[in-house]
Image (spheres, rainbow, N blue to C red):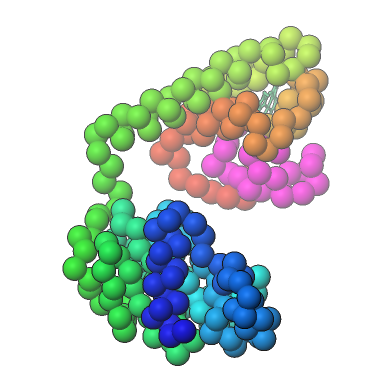
Amino acid sequence: MTSRSLGMLALAALAGGALFVGGAMRGGDALAIEAGSQDGWASRTVWACDQRKAVVVEGVRPDERMKPEKAQQVADLLMDLMRYCNEEITATIGVDQVITVYANGRVYEDYVPGQSLPIMAASFGEPTPRETRIWDAELAKVVAEGDRLFHSDEIGSNGVACAMCHPNASNTHPETYPKFQTQLKKVALLRDMVNWCILNPLEGTALAADDPKLEALEAYILSQRAGTPLQAGKH
Ligand code: HEC
């Protein structure tokens, strides 16, 4: 199978919503994969954070860690393709290093990163007014919940609330984290100090890092300090 036909397979698999992994092939193909990492039959797919761009690296098994130079090449290619913000794009890096790009049902062979493709390059960071309204409203909800918890006695057990000592989140200094905290005897994140205060003055139970209550408290504290420059480690 040529690198191009393998790429087409990858594209077909992606178009069907499936993740293409070399190991999914059957029969003689599976034997070829076991033959070694230099085998062009194997491939590993790496997705960009937007889940719309994928690079299929041929000659690397699905469970194989890539060498630093290869991993950097994949990262660079994904970032290069991120110029086409909203598009779903797949690229393959063949064992022969030839890059093929599949976008909008078209195939661009011998692609060189940086080269421009006849695809509209979407601009980053320009959400529509509707998106902005939705995101702002979602954030406002979380901040409002944090505000409520900060002023409530429900996260502790003794009737004390955060706001009794920190009105309007004063003296919480979120911008100084991470920093070494002597009480904790370690470098602490804001959430560690929030939990410390939940345990100590409030006599409550520490919250897990992904607890929506902890996220809301952090969102409220940080929103009160919007515009303050970050100063990690400041005492
Ligand atoms: C009884 C008063 C009191 C209550 C109630 C209280 N704190 Fe504190 N909090 C303090 C004091 C005093 C410090 C300073 C400790 C230090 O920096 O060594 C502090 C420190 C902090 C810090 C770190 C500030 C910094 O400068 O780094 C954060 C964040 C914080 N509190 C959040 C909270 C939260 C969230 C709550 C509610 C869960 C809360 N506190 C409840 C008294 C209180």
- Residue 10 in the image: state x and y as whole percent: 44, 68
| Image quarter (top left, top right, bottom left or bottom right) of the C terminus | top right
Q: Residue 145 lies in magenta, yes or no?
A: no
> Residue placed at 49% from the left, 25% from the top?
143
- Judging depth in this view, the residue of 145 and 15 nearest the camera is 15
Q: Is residue 140 visible?
A: yes
> Residue placed at 62% from the left, 80% from the top?
28
- The residue most toward the bottom is 96
Q: Residue 110 occupies which quadrant of the picture?
A: bottom left
- Residue 55 in the image: state x and y as whole percent: 45, 69
Q: Is residue 147 left or right of residue 28?
A: left
Q: Residue 31 occupies which quadrant of the picture?
A: bottom right
Q: Is residue 189 left or right of residue 110?
A: right
- Residue 36 in the image: state x and y as whole percent: 66, 85
Q: Which residues are magenta?
A: 171-193
Q: Is residue 221 visible?
A: no
Q: Is residue 120 left or right of residue 222?
A: left
- Judging depth in this view, the residue of 93 and 220 nearest the camera is 93
> Residue placed at 31% from the left, 34% from the top?
132
- The residue most toward the front is 27
In terms of image quarters, where does ligand 1 lie? top right
